[in-house]
Amino acid sequence: AEREAWAPRRQIVGECRLSMLMFAHLASAAFIASRSALLPTPATHPSAAATAGTRACVASAPRRGGEAVMAGMPLPAGSLVALATPMTSTGEVDIATLRELLRWHKAEGTDGVVILGTTGEASTLTSAEKEEVMAATREEVGGEMAILVGTGTISTEATIAATKQAKLFGADAALVVTPYYVKPSQAGLVAHFTRIADAVELPIVLYNVPGRTGVDMSVETTVALSRHPRICGLKDATGDNTRAAPMRAVCGDDFRLYSGEDAAAREYVLQGGDGVISVTANVAPAAVAAVMASGRAGDAAAALAADGPLMALHRDLFCEASPILD
């Protein structure tokens, strides 16, 4: 019998999920194979192994305050894909295709994978589905690519529970969004993230996306949180590239700064950022990695040459609030 995927609980999110299903299919190996001649080969940019050891929050390495961070792989620089969760036509999580996508990203030179984020439709997945995604990801690329798991919720305690679960499933770090809808104060944000970092021995990457959450975590708040030994990075989806250089100067080189805006990521890295958590990398991973490699090398001309052909794709993937392709 058909699973109750489109029962009343899911009717609310059905349209969004179908749109994301189309996006996930377009990111499949078949879609890319037909376009592979247009994209750079993996040899055109550094591999994850070549970049993983630089300025990272490493397991058992002392950080601020003298405390060690307990983790697996270090947080990489470069291109981290905000992975779409592939679905079958009936709304099931397609684990076989997920495994194929992970192997493809490894071959294409993606430096890290972010699962169960916005693009991964975490808010519409059941607990069992999330566990399936985490287990399959760990089996396919664990120890070879850094795995970040989206665990942020509106609730501090629920986020702690989700982060502990991610650690049990072998995550290398958690991506934790600011609480949405309730619009906490800056002091509230400090208290929220500090409580999470204190409770779970897993590196935390802060996620600031005011366009979706209704709250903007200030530079000053980010700097204050960066002093915590387990808070190791930021995904900055504000679109304000002027924040990168000041945060780099104050937070230091071991605090990862990732752009969360594909169209702005090249300039963000040239201004001092470490890389991007990318939606476009679902479709053109080698090309995004090439942009990041040139940007991190300080070669603005090469970065522009690599990014130019991607600009229309950056734009079209966000023609609506979430990435969809018809």
Image (spheres, rainbow, N blue to C red):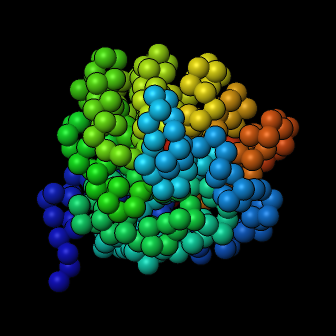
Residue 193 position within the rendered picture, expressed as x and y whole percent measured from the top left: 33, 31
Instruction: Check the image and report above or below for 313 versus 270.
Output: below
Position of 215 compared to 35: left or right?
left
Residue 316 visible, this orientation: no
Residue 63 position within the rendered picture, expressed as x and y whole percent measured from the top left: 51, 35
Farthest residue to the bottom: give it: 1
Farthest residue to the left: give it: 8
Instruction: Check the image and report above or below for 21 versus 119.
Output: below
Residue 132 position within the rendered picture, expressed as x and y whole percent measured from the top left: 33, 69
Position of 40 compared to 91: left or right?
right
- 2 and 191: which one is in front? 191
Q: How many numbered marks have been drawn onto this rendered protein structure?
A: 0
- 90 and 99: which one is in front? 99
- Residue in the image at 17% along x and 83% along y: 1
Residue 90 position within the rendered picture, expressed as x and y whole percent measured from the top left: 30, 73
- Residue in the image at 56% along x and 34% along y: 255
- Residue in the image at 68% along x and 73% along y: 34
Quarter location, residue 249:
top right
- Residue in the image at 35% along x and 55% along y: 167
Residue 41 visible, this orientation: yes
